[in-house]
Image (cartoon, grey):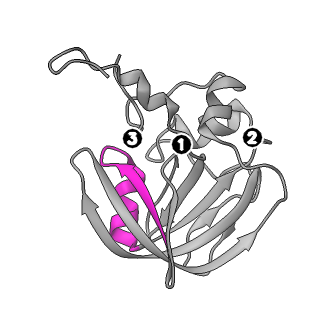
Amino acid sequence: MRQRGASMDVTAMYKFSSGLYVVSAATEDDYGACVINTGLQLTSEPLQVQVVINKQNHTEGVVEKAGHFALIAITEEADMPYIGRFGFRTSTSFAKFEGIESRTTVLGDPYTPVAAACVLACEVVQTLDVGTHMIFVGEVKDAEVLSDAKPMTYAYYHSTLKGKTPPKASSYVKE
């Protein structure tokens, strides 16, 4: 362990692993979708999950306004163009679901079954402002398994796809 006051090795955060997800939401006149690595089951009774979204992402405002969201677990079938579609472009200037198979959850949120292990339709029941990001707790209102393909972990994204962590990601650590 380092001595008090010594420089912290922030790369220790790279040892935390999680999955990769697309979170999306729609209102009557807008929608947003983005890649996150912060989807997590919180409870089983009631069934609740959390997502963490950067406040600078258009999707964060849409989830907040809509009060619900869709969450898919990305599979290892996804490639970098797929990740780029949802993770490195903004919904304000790019139609993320155009040209790709898409569906709508029972709550009205768009999602793609392409490279998706499952989809959850969630109603926001709590929010927490954590500075640069918002945590949304969603009660799962519907769920469906879409594929038996292996869910993509963040470790797989980095090691196999050679993906980078963008500055808006909650896991971004400036070295």
The relative height of residue 71 versus residue 114 in the rendered view (above or below) is below
Q: Which residue is mark 2?
A: 78
Which badge, 2 or 1, comes first in the chain's sequence?
2
Q: Which residue is mark 3?
A: 170
Question: The disc labelled 2 sits on which kind of residue?
Answer: Ala
Q: Quadrant of the C terminus?
A: top left
Q: Secondary structure at mark 2?
A: loop
The relative height of residue 172 versus residue 95 in the rendered view (above or below) is above
Q: Is residue 59 magenta?
A: yes
Q: Please tell me the numbered disc located at residue 82.
A: none
On the image, which quarter does residue 154 sit in?
Answer: top right
Q: Residues within 10 Å of mark 2 (few under 14, many from 20)?
A: some
The relative height of residue 44 versus residue 58 in the rendered view (above or below) is below
Residue 5, given in percent of the width and then of the height, sits at 14, 18
Q: Residues within 10 Å of mark 1 (few under 14, many from 20)?
A: few
Q: Residues within 10 Å of mark 3 (few under 14, many from 20)?
A: some
Q: Please tell me the numbered disc located at residue 94.
A: 1
Q: CA distance from mark 1 to mark 3?
A: 22 Å
Question: The disc labelled 1 sits on which kind of residue?
Answer: Phe
Residue 166 visible here: no
Viewer-nearest residue: 58 or 152: 152
Query: Could you tell me which residue is drawn at 66 percent across and 66 percent down?
Result: 119
Residue 96, given in percent of the width and then of the height, sits at 59, 48
- The residue stretch that appears in magenta: 48-67
Q: Quadrant of the N terminus?
A: top left
Which badge, 1 or 3, comes first in the chain's sequence?
1
Query: Could you tell me which residue is drawn at 69 percent across and 30 percent down?
Result: 80
